[in-house]
Image: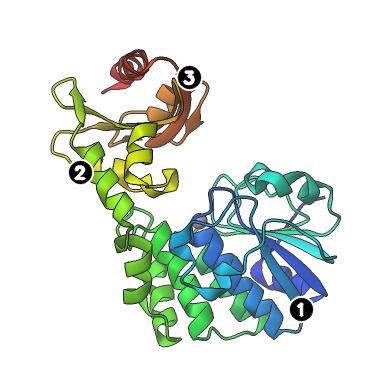
């Protein structure tokens, strides 16, 4: 049966293991990657073999941290325990979900309120990032953060807080950041790679996409489109569109931002962001979901029809 643990119990159980497979979530972000890799290093320092796995490819922008570049996509070795890092649900492990759910000794360290304690041992503390939980776990197992682990945890901290700008930021977030800086974290460098640096292809795609923003309802709804032609002609990759919709939300008067990304002819992956309107309800109309202020769905239709469908749905939920 699933156990809720405090950090000491969780650490004590983990220290009994000989070898641990650490799992990131699909569509990996800086927090799952950074906190998983820091945990791996900490376990190694306690004489425990550990490797990090992710079912999805790791975005190139995170490969500047050498430990992240070592993350594997298939398991070959034997491990005494599995640990999920920053995964609110087992399904977030993607291709590893089934193996995880059948494995006898599983751990779960996460910061999402919605985490359903799916492992044998669960440590879930609601923080702005899972990096903060891993930092505490490292203390509990008696491993001090060094420059390498501090950089990895700093990546998690700044990506999940939008560089200390999101509503989830608390005193605790800064207290952790302070300790990471003391341990040698280079926030300036991490910030550059995580938020600033971009390929020429992405810069060209950004210009193209933003030159054709469409407004509806007196500018309360803004729609951007990333077509297959846009991707092909700029050479940008689909995962490089991260941040586009946040840019749109910064436009005066915009209450709901919509991004339609063409995945194949007449098939769109739709992302929604909102200031206050319930876009989870909008996404649900099309079988999607997410959070009240950020959600997504898929629509199969000819382009103008797809825009019409999504804009009509957003209209119904505008305050
Ligand atoms: Mn996270």
Q: In whole angstroms, how far apart are the C-alphas of marks 1 and 2? A: 46 Å
* Residue 316 visible in this rendered orientation of the protein: yes
Residue at the far front in the pictured view: 233
Residue 254 placement, left or right of 63: left
Residue under numbered circle 3: 286
Q: In whole angstroms, how far apart are the C-alphas of marks 3 and 1? A: 46 Å
Asked if ligand 1 lies within 8 A of label 3, the reply is no
* Vertical relation: 316 (above or below) 166: above
Residue under numbered circle 2: 250
Q: Quadrant of residue 157?
A: bottom left
- Residue 192 spot, x, y in % from top left: 32, 68
The disc, 3 or 1, on the residue closer to the chain's N-terminal end is: 1
Callout 3: 10 Å neighbours few (<14), some, many (20+)? some
Q: Quadrant of the C terminus?
A: top left
Q: Are marks 3 and 1 in contact (CB under 8 Å)?
A: no
- Residue at horizontal 34%, vertical 68%? 191
Residue 10 placement, left or right of 212: right
Name the residue nearer the viewer: 193 or 101.
193
* Vertical relation: 274 (above or below) 2: above
- Residue at horizontal 50%, vertical 68%? 132
* Vertical relation: 98 (above or below) 269: below
Q: Are marks 1 and 2 in contact (CB under 8 Å)?
A: no
* Residue 134 visible in this rendered orientation of the protein: no
Q: Which mark is residue 48?
A: 1
* Vertical relation: 293 (above or below) 221: below
Count of residue discs: 3
Name the residue nearer the viewer: 216 or 140.
216
- Residue 249 spot, x, y in % from top left: 24, 40
- Residue at horizontal 85%, vertical 65%? 78
Q: In whole angstroms, how far apart are the C-alphas of marks 3 and 2? A: 26 Å
Residue 221 placement, left or right of 290: left
């Amino acid at each position: 049966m699933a156990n809720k643990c405090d950090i000491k119990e969780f650490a004590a159980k983990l220290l009994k293991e000989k070898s641990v497979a650490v799992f990131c979530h699909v569509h990996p972000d800086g927090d799952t990657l950074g906190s998983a890799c820091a945990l791996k290093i900490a376990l190694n320092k306690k004489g425990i073999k550990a490797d990090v796995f992710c079912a999805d490819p790791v975005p190139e922008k995170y490969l500047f941290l050498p430990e992240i570049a070592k993350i594997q996509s298939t398991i070959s070795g034997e491990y005494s325990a599995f640990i999920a890092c920053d995964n609110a649900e087992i399904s977030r492990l993607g291709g590893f979900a089934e193996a995880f759910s059948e494995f006898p000794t599983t751990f779960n360290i996460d910061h999402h309120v919605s985490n359903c304690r799916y492992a044998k041992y669960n440590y879930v503390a609601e923080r702005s990032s899972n990096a903060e939980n891993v930092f505490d776990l490292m203390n509990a197992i008696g491993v001090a953060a060094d420059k390498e682990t501090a950089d990895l945890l700093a990546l998690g901290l700044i990506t999940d807080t939008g560089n200390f700008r999101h509503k989830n930021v608390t005193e605790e977030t800064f207290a952790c950041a302070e300790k990471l800086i003391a341990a040698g974290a280079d926030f300036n460098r991490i910030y550059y790679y995580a938020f600033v640096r971009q390929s020429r292809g992405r810069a060209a795609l950004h210009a193209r996409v933003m030159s054709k923003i469409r407004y509806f309802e007196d500018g309360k709804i803004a729609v951007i489109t990333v077509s297959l032609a846009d991707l092909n002609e700029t050479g940008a990759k689909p995962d490089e569109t991260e941040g586009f919709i946040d840019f749109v939300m910064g436009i005066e008067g915009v209450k709901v931002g919509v991004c339609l990304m063409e995945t194949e002819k007449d098939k769109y992956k739709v992302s929604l962001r909102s200031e206050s309107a319930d876009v989870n309800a909008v996404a649900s109309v099309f079988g999607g979901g997410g959070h009240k202020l950020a959600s997504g769905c898929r629509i199969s239709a000819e382009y103008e029809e797809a825009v019409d469908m999504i804009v009509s749905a957003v209209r119904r939920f505008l305050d």
